[in-house]
Amino acid sequence: MPSTHKKDKPWDTDDIDKWKVEPFKPSDNAGGTFAEESSFAVLFPKYREVYLKEAWSGITKALQQIGIACTLDLIEGCMTVKTTRKTWDPAAILKARDLIKLLARSVPAPQALRILQDDVACDIIKIRNLVRNKEKFVKRRQRILGPNGQTLKALELLTQTYILVQGNTVSALGPYKGLKEVRRVVEDCMANIHPIYQIKELMIKRELAKDPELAHENWERFLPNYKKRSLSKRKVPYKVTDKSKKVYTPFPPAQEKSKVDLQIEAGEYHIGKEAKKRIAQEERMEQQKVKQEEKKRQREQDFIAPEENPAERKKKKRKTKGEE
């Protein structure tokens, strides 16, 4: 039986970009209104009240265009978004949820409204739980910013994203490919790998992408390979044990004598406390006498005249006479 699925498709031509994401229009929603209402609520800090109050009118207008209702509750410190009967895009409520999340994380309203576009996504990276020590966390978070924010600006230009470091999170906004790179750089920075290495790698990749001949080749030979140069932090033992091979014996080594056994052998176990103190003092005095004698000998050595050979003296005298 001949196959029926291999038919000519006159509408499928080579000039069609199959990877292009077409915008979702109201005419594409054949099902009509949604059966149930969906809503999301996000709390925001108190210092954001004034800014949100000023920018809320613009946010409401932008959400009304996609049929999403929003409310700002300043008493409870909460932002809420929900679908209405005018909502025609199923993904609109998810975009609105991401919008209020970004606004709560101190992202400016003009930047946050870009999330409503189809080709823009967001990623809020939690960085506080990646480093235990507070001082290390503050230093590594500062590395993401760099001097005068230069590192952050370079990262934004290379990944084509908007990045905001705020408190315990890093908010990123842009294309999916750029967000993936930003997350990798931020997590590596928190793991004590400086962002400059990734920035250098991204710069090389951007230049390689311009060359069409290298589009289907492996780029690893062009990328820098950094080796870890830090010394090992393993502590060397003070007493190095003898690791030379010894003759095997099936019997275990003899048990070491305890302090009590040593005292019994020396005959000190049954002696009273006062006698023990007297013996210890006598030993101390003997050690002091030995040390004093050694120091005395060292001092006297400076005053001992070096020995002279009489034959050498005569030779020196003869040489002087011949010269005369």
Image (cartoon, helix red, strand yellow):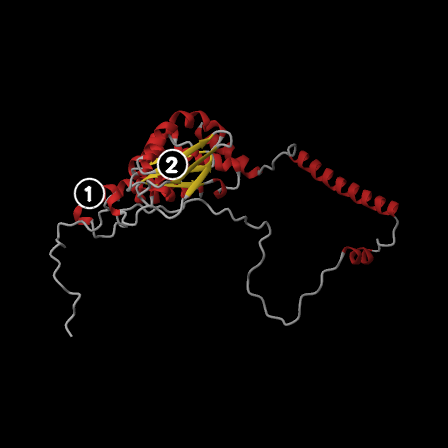
Q: Left or right of 242: which side holds 189? A: left
Q: Left or right of 27: which side holds 319? A: right
Q: At label 2, which amino acid type do we have?
A: Ala
Residue 310 in picture, x, y percent from top left: 58, 37
Foreground residue, 288 or 244?
Answer: 244
- The residue under label 2 is 69
- The residue under label 1 is 210
How far apart are labels 1 and 2 at the CA level?
A: 44 Å
| Residue 263, above or below 193 | below
Label 1: which secondary element: loop
Label 2: which secondary element: strand
| Residue 268, above or below 280 | below
Q: Answer yes or no: is residue 193 visible.
A: no
Foreground residue, 90 or 218?
Answer: 90
Which residue shows up at 28% across the image and 47% down it?
A: 29
Q: Which mark is residue 225?
A: none
Foreground residue, 276 or 214?
Answer: 214
Which residue shows up at 55% across the image and 62% down it?
A: 244
Residue 137 in picture, x, y percent from top left: 48, 37
The mark lying in front, picked from 1 and 2, is 2
Q: Quadrant of residue 182?
A: top left
Residue 18 in picture, x, y percent from top left: 20, 51
Lower sequence index among marks 1 and 2: 2
Which residue ends up furthest to the bottom in the rendered image? 1
Q: At label 1, which amino acid type do we have?
A: Lys
